[in-house]
Amino acid sequence: MELKEQEKFLEIKKEVVKMIENKKEKLKENNIKIDIMNDEENYYILDFESDKGIARLEVTTPHFAPYYYTCFNILWLNDDEAYWWLDKENSTVIDILKNLEKSLDYFINS
């Protein structure tokens, strides 16, 4: 893996950690539990659980998956259509963070 890719992963991870910290109160108000499923050198995976559904936010180093660095998915308990957001190889860090925040807000406010 190129150093540039590792640096981008670490920047995204750092900003996601800040984002979660800034939303902790809102998550708590909405009875959303957060579990860190994986926090390693190349992976940062969070699971969210509410009485309406579950969600997973993944930040990884680039690999062969349907996404490049990040993925956010929601499965609703009332059989509503699942929600997915995946980045692309050419996504900027700013675009990734905007879309992750939008996805998390969607889960929190639903």
Image: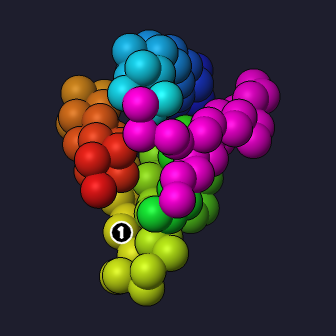
Residue 101 falls in which quadrant of the image? Answer: top left
Magenta includes 48?
yes
Image coordinates of residue 80 in percent, x first then y, are: 35, 82
Assign a secondary structure to mark 1: strand
Q: Nearer the viewer, residue 87 or 58?
A: 58
- For image coordinates 74% across by 29% down, the residue present is 39
Instruction: Assign the magenta stretch its main secondary structure.
Output: strand
Residue at image mark 1:
83
Answer left or right for 62 relative to 92. right
Query: Where 44 falls versus 79 (above or below)?
Result: above
| In-front residue for pair 77/103 | 77
Tell me what residue is drawn at x 38 percent, y 65 percent. Answer: 84
Q: Is residue 34 above or below residue 4?
A: below
**Front one among 22 and 84:** 22
> Dividing the image into 4 quarters, which one contains the C terminus?
bottom left
Above or below 18: residue 23 = below
- Where residue 19 appears, as percent x and y from the top left, is 39, 21
Q: Which residues are magenta?
A: 29-51
> Residue drawn 36% across and 68% down?
83
Q: Is residue 6 magenta?
A: no
Mark 1: amino acid:
Tyr
Between 108 and 67, the residue placed more toward the observer is: 108
Query: In the rendered view, would you say 26 is above or below 50?
Result: above
Q: Is residue 32 visible?
A: yes
Q: Report x, y in % for residue 91.
A: 27, 43
Instruction: Answer few, some or many: residues within 10 Å of disc 1's Cα (few below 14, many 20 plus, some between 14 and 19).
Output: some
Residue 98 position by quadrant: top left
Q: Is residue 103 left or right of residue 32?
A: left
Q: Residue 107's x, y, as percent?
A: 36, 51
Residue beneath the point at 52% across and 59% down: 51
